[in-house]
Amino acid sequence: MDQSHDESILARGREILEAEGEAVLAAAAGLDAAFCRAVRLIESCTGSVVVTGIGKAGLVARKISATLASTGTPSHFLHPAEAMHGDLGALRGDDVVLALSQSGETEEITRLLPHVNARQVPIVALTAKPESTLGRAATVVVPTGSVREACGLGLAPSTSTALMLSLGDALALVTSSRRQFTPEDFAARHPGGSLGRQLMLVEDAMRPVDECRLATPEETVRAVFARPLPARRTGAVMIVTEGDRLEGIFTDSDLARLFEHRHDDLLDAAIKTVMTARPATVPVGTRLRDAVAILETRRLSELPVTDGAGKVVGLLDIVDLVGLVPDEAIQRPRAPAPVAA
C-alpha cells in the first residue's frame, strides 16, 4: 500500500466534501424571504408539487419529489422532454411546479415554461440566476448562487447538485413541519423495509393473548408447567386475575433458578409467591422500537402488552423480534426475578 497515494486520495476527498459543505452552509446563511414565499406556495398547494429537471438536476428533482411525497406533500416528477410529448397532461391547475436548473437556461426547461405559464401554474425555481429565462418565468426564485463545481475540471455537476438537493430537502421538511406531519403519517407512507419495521406497533409483532401461556395466581408452579404448551412456545407465563388483568409474570429463567437453588418445594406453591409482580408492560399503540428499547434497558426477554384497562392483549417475545429489530437490541437475556424464600 502506498501511504503517500492514500494521503493524496483522502486530501482530495476532503476537498470535495468541504467545497460542497461550504456551499450548503453559505446557502443556509443566505436564505431570505424568497424561501419563505416558496414554502408558503408549496404549503398552500391543493394539488401536487410537480418537480422537473433534466440530467443531474433531473435526478436530484426525482429525489426531492420522493422526499416531498413521503413527508406529507403530494408530488411527482415530470420529465421536461417527455412533457412536450404528452406528459404535460399530468399537470393540473391546482399544482405547483418546482423547476431545477443551475443555469436557468436548460433548453428542455425553457421550452416547458410557456406551457406551464399558460396554465397559470405557479413555478418555484431553484437556479443560480434569477435573471435567467427560468428565473423570469418563475413565481418565486430560491437562488442557489454561483458556485464552482467540486469536479477537478469545474464542469461536472457536483457542488451545484448537492446544493439543490439540500435546498429541496429544506423546502420539503419545513413544509412538512408546518403541516404538523406526525410519526403516524410517516408510518402510513413507509410500511415496508427498515423504516417500516422501525415504525411498527407492538400489536403488529406481539403474540395475541390466545397464543400465550396464562395462569391464575393461586395455581401451583407444577400445575402451570404441566399444561400443554401453545403451538408457538414462549418463555413466559403471564399471571392474570378475572378479566385477564395482569398481576405478574413468571419465566423459564425463574423456573430454572428454582432448580438451581434447590427450591423444589416451591414447585407446589402458588405461582403468585414466585412471580414477578407488577412487571414492565407496554400499552397497545406503542411503537415497536420503543418497546425494544425497554427490553434492552431492562434486560428483558418478554414484555406483556396491555390495553388501557390493564387487560393483557398479548406478549412481545424477543425470539419473534429477530430480523425485525437491530441485533444489538436483542442480545441480552432477561435477568431472573428474585425468588421468595
Image: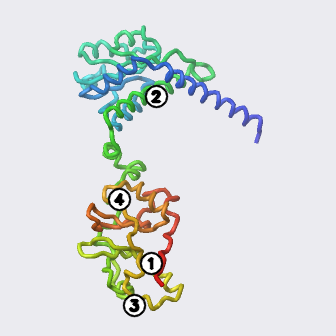
Q: Secondary structure at mark 3?
A: helix
For this view, does 109 lie left or right of residue 30?
A: left
Residue at point 37%, 24% (across, down): 52
Q: CA distance from mark 3 to mark 2?
A: 68 Å
Q: Secondary structure at mark 4?
A: helix
Labels 1 and 4: the sequence-earlier one: 4
Q: Is residue 251 visible?
A: yes
Q: Which residue is mark 2?
A: 165
Question: Residue 268 has which mark?
Answer: 3
- In the rendered image of this protein, does residue 202 appear above or below residue 127? below
Q: Secondary structure at mark 1?
A: helix
Looking at the rendered structure, the kind of residue marked 1 is Asp
Query: Is residue 301 or residue 240 the one in the foreground?
Result: 240
- Give x and y (percent) for residue 93: 22, 21
Q: CA distance from mark 3 to mark 4?
A: 34 Å
Looking at the rendered structure, the kind of residue marked 3 is Asp
Question: Residue 202 has which mark?
Answer: 4
Question: Residue 252 has which mark?
Answer: 1
Q: Is residue 234 visible?
A: no
Query: Is residue 3 or residue 214 the one in the foreground?
Result: 214
Residue at point 49%, 70% (across, down): 334
Q: Which is closer to the viewer, label 3 or label 4? A: 3
